[in-house]
Image: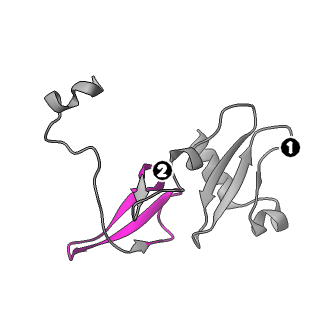
Amino acid sequence: MWEYRDRYAFHIPEFNYYEGEVLYEKWFEAGEVGLTTDQPHFPFRRLRMERIVEINGKKSKLSAKSLSTSKDGPERTITIKGSTGSLYEVQIGGKRGPSCSCKGYQFRRSCRHIVEAEKLAA
């Protein structure tokens, strides 16, 4: 069907292009980023990072591959964005249980990144 897309979806663009300044808010879900708009009634939009294909003409590092789980084996690795915008590697499953690369996990052996990764994996 895709090769005949011009016949059934000619008026729908393949990609949406957005411009604006990047925002990070605490209440954004894991894997979301904000982008400002120039409209007063619609000050910003929320985008899922795995849906971003290009940023300034360069291929996005945060594609669906980096934010999705790899289901090769019983242990899965998921990349989660922290509250400051840092990315953390969370490992779920396996013999040792969940683990995270953040400092909070190293100190407490639990963190919110593991909870968010388990929500994404479900």
- For the residue pair 90 and 64, the one nearer the viewer reads as 64
Residue 31 numbered tag: none
Q: Residue at x 83, y 64 (%)?
A: 106
Q: Nearer the viewer, mark 1 or mark 2?
A: 2
**Residue in the image at 43% along x and 73% along y:** 23
Q: Residue 93: which quarter of the image?
A: top right
Against 74, is 23 above or below?
below
Disc 1, SS: loop
C-alpha separation, residue under disc 1 versus residue under disc 2? 28 Å
| CA neighbours of label 2 inside 10 A, class few (<14), some (14 to 19), many (20+) | some
Q: Could you tell me the amino acid type at mark 1? A: Arg
Q: Earlier in the sequence, mark 1 or mark 2?
A: 2
Indicate left or right for 41 with 107 as reference: left
Q: Which residue is mark 1?
A: 96
Say few, some or many: other residues with alpha carbon within 10 Å of mark 1 (under 14 / 14 to 19 / 20 or more).
few
Amino acid, disc 2? Glu
Circle 2 — which element? helix
Q: Position of residue 45 (x, y in %)?
A: 33, 64
Taking the magenta stretch, the answer to whether it contains residue 121 is no
Q: State if disc 2 and disc 1 touch (CB < 8 Å).
A: no
Q: Position of residue 14 (x, y in %)?
A: 27, 43
Give me the residue at 30% from left, 62% from top: 18
Vertical order, 104 against 122 (above or below): below
User: Which mark is on residue 50?
Assistant: 2
Q: The magenta stretch spans which residues?
A: 23-51
Residue 40 or 69: which is nearer the viewer? Answer: 69
Q: Which quadrant, please, contains the N terminus? A: top left
Left or right, 14 with respect to 121, comes to: left
Whether 107 is drawn above or below 40: the answer is above
**Residue 92 position within the rendered picture, expressed as x and y whole percent measured from the top left:** 73, 44
